[in-house]
Amino acid sequence: MEDKLNKIVSLCKRRGFIFPGSDIYGGLSSIWDYGPLGARLKKKIKDIWWKTYVEERDDIVGLDSSIIMHKDVFLASGHLSGFVDLLVDCPNCKKRHRLDKILKISEEIYKCPDCNVDIDINKNKPRKFNLMFKTNVSATEDEPIDAYLRPETAQGIFVNFLNVLDTTHKKLPFGIAQIGKAFRNEVTSGNFIFRMKEFEQMEIEYFVNPQEAEEFYRYWVNERYEFYIKKIGLRKENLRLREHSKEELAHYAKACSDIEYNFPFGFSELEGIANRGDFDLKEHSRVSKKDLSYFDEKTKTKFIPYVIEPSSGVDRTFFAVICDAYYEEKVKDETRIVLKLKSDLAVYEVAVFPLLKNKSQLVEVAKNIFYGIKDKISSCYDDTAAIGKLYRRQDEIGTPFCITVDFKTLEDKTVTIRDRDTMLQERVSIDKIIDFLKERLGR
Ligand code: GAP
């Protein structure tokens, strides 16, 4: 399984999906950059989410709030005091670990995962470490004004609740959705893009009447689970739901379920769906002294809505998509690596090649085909290697179809179109390419 993780990291770097952050300076732990193909795939994931929840529904509106936020936001949210990890240092190898992530032998004794030595927490006292990144928004260093990078996009939604309500006149139940960066100074590294210091979330805060909170909580758990299967194309057997025990709940949550994906290192959280109760709006009302309650015209009552929060990670969804689509197949004694991506997530829907790059007639026809289809079908053109290598490249990035222009094309104006999954090739006349591909892509 470790092997699969290494293979995926290597594929992502080799093909330009993901690079280590600040790579030429030796990288930074738990910081990653998305390359040309990664940026495209990531955008597709976000677009599907946004279209599903903001564009296709009339009960959810979008928001794009700032990353840097007032320190009082986090006083109210509880992050300043409560968003901490307990860290312990191994007395032997000196490595620092999160106490909740290492093996507990007894109440006092933990096991160092690196050198296997016992860590006695009476002698090596665990220390609290706040995960938020602090910054200074003052113009001078002598009079700093503290602010923080948001550790979740959710807080940008809560502080804008009143602005959105006043400008959209939405009635309960309604949601505010946001996609954006969040920052946490995570100590545990490894596992590729699973846990990063800078990552992206897709969050909805869905405001409801408190009496309907349980019903909407169940609705969102189911809705989000189905989303990963139907819209993202993850295999059902690689997904599972896990309800949090009372002890595990975050300080704000009344209930929470995780959607877990079977990553190469085992089932781990892909998304959390929480019933946050009225914690956030109540605390922001108290600290900001602004009334964040809602007036219900039907019952003529005023109350603080409850909020149901489906909170998904863009990067973890990306990671799950790659893991789910990754296949190795034996083809004539060679191993073919292929990403069997759902066609609407594939970076390109089709690639166009000339059979030989030094035959100018083939190159010219292939380029004409590419320029003729690229605004209707997402396409790329490649003539930088031999045909076998070009197919392998496209298989590895998950392109569903490859068009090859060969000598027969010059005679009868037909090309071969190769299917990524079956590797079968069909001859199609040039003027039918778009219809053929649209039909095969299910458009
Ligand atoms: N607003 C609620 C919230 O932030 P969370 O469980 O801490 O809840 C939600 O985060 C989702 O954000 C996670 O399920 C995960 O997909 C993603 N996420 C959280 N921390 C992350 C990290 N350090 N790196 C990558 N993704 C992360």
Image (cartoon, helix red, strand yellow):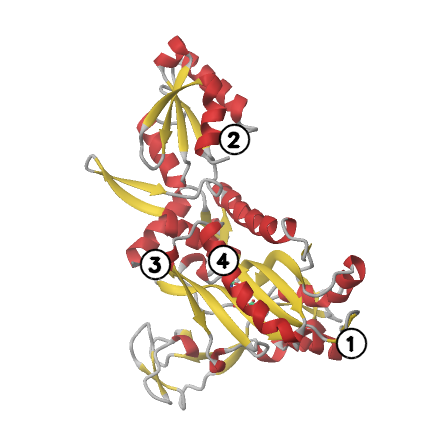
- Number of the front mark, 3 or 4: 3
For the point 45% across and 49% down, the residue is 19
- Number of the front mark, 1 or 4: 1
Q: Is mark 1 within 8 Å of ligand 1?
A: no
- Earlier in the chain: of badge 1 and badge 4, it is 4
For the point 48% across and 82% down, the residue is 247
Left or right of residue 173: residue 317: left
Q: Tell me, for residue 31, which label it has, or none.
A: 4
Which image quadrant is residue 302 in? bottom right
Q: CA distance from mark 3 to mark 1?
A: 51 Å
Residue at numbered disc 3: 264
Nearer to the camera, 240 or 337: 240
Q: Tell me, for residue 377, which label it has, or none.
A: 2
Q: Is mark 2 within 8 Å of ligand 1?
A: no
- Earlier in the chain: of badge 1 and badge 2, it is 1
For badge 4, the amino acid type reads: Ile
| Marks 4 and 2 in Cβ contact (< 8 Å) | no
For badge 3, the amino acid type reads: Pro
Estimate the x, y position of residue 57 in percent, counting from the top left: 64, 52
Label 3: which secondary element: loop
